[in-house]
Amino acid sequence: MSPTKRTPKHPAYGSRRRAVLGRCAETDKVRAMLVSRPPDVRYLTGFTGEDSWLLFGGGWATLITDGRFAEQARRECPKIDVAVRTGAMEPEAAAAVKKRRIRRLAVQGTHMTVRAHQKLGEHLPRVRLAPVADVVRKVRAVKADHEVRALRKAIRVAERAFKEFLAPGAKALVGRTERAAAARLDHLMRLGGASGPAFETILAAGRHGSLCHYRPGSTVIRRNQAVLVDWGARVGGYCSDLTRVIFTGRIPARIGEIYPVVLEAQRTGIATIRSGVACRTVDAAARAVIAAAGYGEAFRHSLGHGIGLEVHEAPGLARTQGGRLRSGMVVTVEPGIYLPGLGGVRIEDDVLVTRQGPKRLSALPRDIQAMVVR
């Protein structure tokens, strides 16, 4: 009997670091990089703590942290060196750079503050600091199989919580404040296995639905209202991001008119997704549906974005976005129409890009009648 192929227990962090360093070498000819952005540190090491930097080069890596995370770092990152700092970050990082005799160092130009860059330069007068933009972000955009599985789990936790949230019917919403209803959904996600919501849950009743990033307040939800809910769970570090519009009885006339337009725009956008397709093409396909219905100006944001360790990652699905989709990317598709004073509709699902086409990872119903609770 032939030996079975075992799936590695942990992600190939070394391969990730080599991929990032390869991109740096292509553009800036550097052989070492200092990563200061926490989600990127986690992606490249598995470390889940805070306030820590990663220095790495070909075949070696050093995580610079402090005493609060020393034990955690050694447990989570058994294959890399852990340097426990006792002072400020910049001199400790500089000492690690000098130890490796690095003369040209890539730093995260879109994250490192001016002050940190200045302080690091003062401690490394003979080292050229080369700011690089979005290098880790680009590598993170394509998800490995285990990341897709993690995203699926985050989606399922969010979906189960939503179903349980609506199980009592209209009384789950009617008579409650937006803030209380949102808190209940967040609680259900935690009970279902989430470490917390992936972002601040949006729950907007009635006319508040026209505010794209509304924060739930003290408004009491009434019968025969449209309630826009944008929520997601964080599970194992990975995020989900979903949006539905719930109707607490009768469907308001204007909202009922725009709902099928948004749904058709979403279906059209999803159908356009395929490896090799330009990101802006997907946005344009969905946007054309809304524009043809006469609501072009009421669609105020891009069509979607990547998700992963963060709720907003590369790639972006937008009119101004360059680049093309690649197999393994996971994106949200979330067209919307917003009518000030009346409310809005946004429908959002998470979609895996494949060579054969799109694969919708979220499975909640989208038909308007399925969104009515009584």
Image (spheres, rainbow, N blue to C red):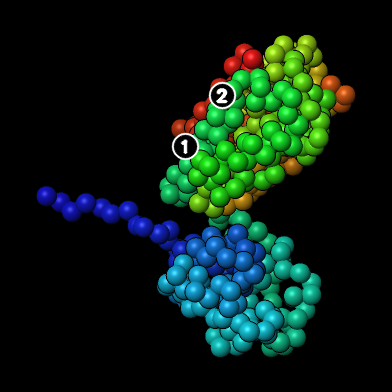
Q: Quadrant of residue 166?
A: top right
Residue drawn at x 54%, y 85% is 100
Q: Secondary structure at mark 2?
A: loop
Q: Is residue 295 above or below residue 19?
A: above
Residue 292 in view: no
Tell me how far mark 1 sits from mark 2, CA to CA: 38 Å
Q: Which residue is under mark 1?
A: 355
Q: Which secondary structure lies at badge 1? A: loop
Q: Nearer the viewer, residue 355 or 4?
A: 4
Callout 2 environment at 10 Å: few (<14), some (14 to 19), or many (20+)? few
Disc ID at residue 167: 2
Q: Is residue 40 visible?
A: yes
Query: What's under tag 1, amino acid-wise?
Result: Arg
Is 177 located above or below residue 223 in the figure? below
Q: Please tell me which residue is depicted at 70% across the width and 18% down the height of the picture.
A: 248
Residue at 62 percent across and 40 percent down: it is 186
Q: Residue 284 placed where, x, y %?
A: 70, 30
Q: Nearer the viewer, mark 1 or mark 2?
A: 2
Q: Tags 1 and 2 in contact by the CB under 8 Å rule?
A: no
Q: x, y (%) of residue 229?
A: 68, 31
Task: Tell me how many marks there are.
Answer: 2
**Of the residues shown, which amino acid type is indicated by label 2?**
Ala
Whole-percent x, y for residue 191 in the image: 53, 42
Quadrant of the image for the C terminus? top right
